[in-house]
Image (cartoon, rainbow, N blue to C red):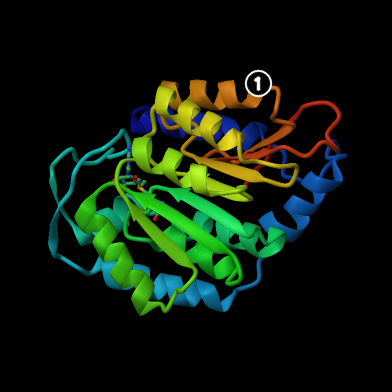
Amino acid sequence: MYSVPQTIFKYLRYYLTASNGKGHGIHSPFVFDFISTVLNDKATYPAYTKVEALRTKLLKDPAILEVEDLGAGSSVSQSKQRSVQSIAKNAAKPPKLGQLLFRMVQHYQPGTLIELGTSLGITSSYLALGNPAGKLWTLEGAGLVAQMAGTNFEALQLRNISLIPGNFDDTLPALLRESPSVDFAFIDGNHRLVPTIRYFEQLLGKLHNESILVFDDIHWSPEMERAWETIRQHPAVRCTIDLFFIGVVVFRQEFREKQHFTIRH
Ligand SMILES: C[S@@+](CC[C@H](N)C(=O)[O-])C[C@H]1O[C@@H](n2cnc3c(N)ncnc32)[C@H](O)[C@@H]1O
């Protein structure tokens, strides 16, 4: 992974060069709508209060869990024993990104959603609340962490989530064999080049014109930047949106020419 100074430098470069979405150059109706209706939506939704109350509770929980390390991403500690509060602090997406994912799901109303990397279920809760009529399959390999996520879903009375324990290498192909199609997927675990491309290729077989993929931490490491670049170049991809901490991938045929946007968020 990049060091903190490297990440700050990269972020500053992104911030200074990214479009603010208000100026010229956004001719795509899809991207214009994404920016004005989803990205820049400043309303406060009841889901925010619900999920942030869960986060606050987890951030105060000193309980120690035995955690299997199944992939790159544990940037703070390689230790197998981690407190719930440290997992909530370091693994979960911050409110700003969780809430953006909530608004994406609320806006596009995907029926079948997949999350690779549940952790304690904070972002899963945002995804599930975005479309209560949809169904979220969330995959997590660390057994006790998954168990705790299940308890959190119960506490929030989220009935539209199925938690699948196990390594993505086994659980994703098995899930996809049973899924007719995937409308939305958030890939947030095992931040390495080869697995990330493999998950992308496995998902590809189940995508359609309106499907959306979101990749986490696309500038986290040289490997993740290469993965993002490979995904951007893939012929099936019609449009990508780089928001620095996450990358959005769109397959709509209305993009006759492949387009790439870097938008400030
Ligand atoms: C960054 S955390 C997910 C955070 C969560 N999406 C959120 O925002 O609240 C990544 C999770 O992926 C899990 N993970 C990483 N590699 C995995 C693999 N190969 N199979 C299953 N789970 C894996 C880790 O155990 C970890 O809990």
Q: Is residue 206 above or below residue 53?
A: above
Q: Is residue 64 above or below residue 223?
A: below
Residue 93 at least partly seen: no
> Which residue in the structure is indicated by mark 1?
233
At x 21% / y 60%, what residue is drawn? 84
Q: Is residue 22 above or below residue 105?
A: above
Q: Callout 1: 10 Å neighbours few (<14), some, many (20+)?
A: some
At x 59% / y 65%, what residue is drawn? 134
Quadrant of the image occupied by residue 64: bottom left
Residue 129 at least partly seen: yes
Q: Amino acid at mark 1?
A: Gln
Frontmost residue, 48 versus 255: 255
Secondary element at tag 1: helix
Frontmost residue, 161 versus 246: 161
Q: Is residue 197 above or below residue 84?
A: above
Q: Position of residue 109 (x, y in %)?
A: 68, 62
Q: Position of residue 194 (x, y in %)?
A: 42, 22
At x 55% / y 27%, what residue is drawn? 228
Quadrant of the frame with the N terminus: top left
Quadrant of the image occupied by residue 71: top left
Horizontal side of 256 relative to 92 (left or right) equals right
At x 74% / y 31%, what residue is drawn? 238
Horizontal side of 89 relative to 186 (left or right) equals left
Mark 1, ligand 1, within 8 Å: the answer is no
